[in-house]
Image (cartoon, helix red, strand yellow):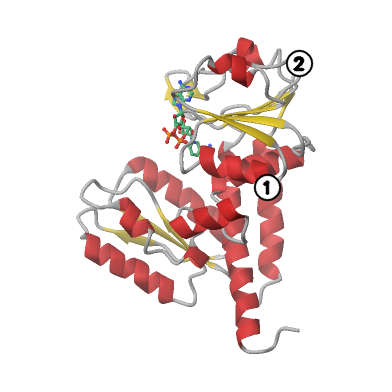
């Protein structure tokens, strides 16, 4: 049966690495989490991000804003965070209340502080292979593959899902690593016949149990990005119990991709701080 890819353990290693990198910086990076309103799930996510930020030795620069804040006032807050030198990363927790326009607010975030990797400029930098901040969940998937030494170069990777948050950025990351990438989505015909060709199969469709054993080549690596709350606890897009008999390696839900997302957020915050620091040295002529 398959190797179980332990996302909790890999996430811990990434957090430890990040904490070491923090100590090598002249100033502690600061993560500004912005929570609008009182959505309970968002509050839980944000408090977990803040806790890990502090544990990694970074400054927790949290802003909790009222749920009825205006578009203009929130835009102003984001501009202030852009201008604040203590802030190295800005995370606008989504979803926002319905009266706010998320895309135009995300667009306000300085791409060099865009630790979620969601601005148009960050997406463009990724697509063109330029340095920049990458979305956390897709980079967590790459980190898991690397931690288990699963070869990416030349492998056929099939990504199920083409969202701006997961599927599309993951496709670019895999291409940068020289995988042969096929992208599937809701209009793909005969999904299983495509996914069966995958050496690396990534399920990010948001459909519980979409990937069964017949959709998986024996020995393939299966990464399950999906998260669904059910009466029996969290489940993914992959039918873990049956696919584990076919796959060579597989991520569980929970405990696979999920823990990687916050770890990569911390990593991005340090990356942003280090880039800022290097740019500052350059500007003042200190860099060699
Ligand atoms: P989304 O709804 O934005 O995108 C889903 C994608 O899957 C779309 O491109 C769609 O075309 C495709 N799709 C839908 N049904 C399909 C089907 N039957 N066959 C093939 N393709 C199909 O979702 P998202 O934001 O990309 O998230 C996907 C899943 O990952 C969700 O379950 C979400 O909760 C989870 N997620 C997990 C994390 C994490 O930290 N682990 C982070 C983000 C999202």
Q: Answer left or right for 46 relative to 155.
A: left
277 lies above or below 247: below
Crowdedness of circle 2 by 10 Å Cα count: few (<14), some, many (20+)? Answer: few
Position of the C terminus, as image quadrant, is bottom right
Q: Nearer the viewer, mark 1 or mark 2?
A: 1
Distance Cα–Cα, label 1 vs label 2: 30 Å
User: Residue 205, how many percent across, how many down?
Assistant: 48, 28
- The residue depicted at 49 percent of the width and 49 percent of the height is 48
**What is the secondary structure assignment of the residue under circle 2?**
loop
Is residue 53 visible to us here? yes
Residue 172 versus residue 182 in the image, above or below: below
The disc, 1 or 2, on the residue closer to the chain's N-terminal end is 2
Q: Where is residue 95 in the image (x, y as percent from the top left)?
A: 34, 45
Q: Is residue 241 visible?
A: no
Q: Are marks 1 and 2 in contact (CB under 8 Å)?
A: no
* Vertical position of residue 132 compared to residue 259: above or below: below
203 or 172: nearer the viewer: 172
Q: How many labels does the image show?
A: 2
Question: Residue placed at 48% from the left, 70% from the top?
Answer: 87
Residue 62 position by quadrant:
bottom left
**Disc 2 beta carbon < 8 A from ligand 1?**
no
Q: Ligand 1 within 8 A of label 1's CB? A: no
Judging by the rendered image, the residue that carries numbered circle 2 is: 1
- The residue under the point 36% across, 73% down is 80
Q: Residues within 10 Å of mark 1 (few under 14, many from 20)?
A: some
Question: Residue 269: percent from the left, percent from the top?
Answer: 57, 61
Q: Mark 1 points at which residue?
A: 176
Question: What mark, if any, has residue 90 been given in the picture?
Answer: none
On-image quarter of the N terminus = top right
Q: Which of 154 and 16 is in front in this view?
A: 154
Left or right, residue 89 beside residue 176 = left
Q: What element carries label 1?
A: helix
């Amino acid at each position: 049966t398959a190797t179980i890819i332990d996302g909790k353990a890999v996430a811990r290693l990434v957090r430890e690495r990040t904490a070491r990198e923090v100590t090598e910086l002249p100033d502690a990076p600061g993560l500004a989490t912005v929570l609008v309103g009182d959505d309970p799930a968002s509050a839980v996510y944000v408090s977990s991000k803040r806790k890990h930020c502090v544990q990694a030795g970074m400054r927790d620069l949290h802003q909790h804003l009222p749920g009825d804040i205006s578009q203009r006032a929130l835009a102003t807050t984001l501009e202030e965070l852009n201008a604040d030198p203590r802030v190295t990363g800005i995370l606008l927790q989504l979803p926002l209340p319905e009266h706010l326009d998320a895309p135009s607010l995300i667009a306000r975030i300085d791409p060099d502080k865009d630790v979620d990797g969601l601005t148009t400029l960050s997406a463009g930098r990724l697509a063109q292979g330029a340095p920049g901040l990458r979305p956390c969940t897709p980079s967590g998937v790459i980190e898991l593959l690397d931690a288990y030494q699963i070869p990416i170069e030349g492998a056929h990777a099939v990504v199920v899902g083409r969202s701006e948050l997961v599927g599309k950025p993951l496709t670019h990351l895999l291409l940068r690593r020289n995988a042969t990438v096929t992208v599937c989505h809701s209009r793909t015909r005969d999904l299983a016949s495509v996914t069966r060709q995958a050496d690396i199969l990534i399920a990010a469709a948001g459909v519980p149990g979409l990937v069964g054993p017949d959709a998986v080549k024996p020995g393939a690596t299966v990464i399950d990005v999906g998260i669904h709350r059910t009466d029996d606890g969290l489940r993914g897009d992959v039918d873990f119990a049956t696919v584990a008999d076919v796959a060579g390696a597989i991520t569980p839900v929970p405990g696979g991709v999920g823990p990687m997302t916050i770890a990569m957020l911390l990593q991005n915050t340090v990356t942003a701080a280090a880039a800022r620091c290097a740019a500052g040295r350059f500007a003042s002529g200190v860099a060699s």
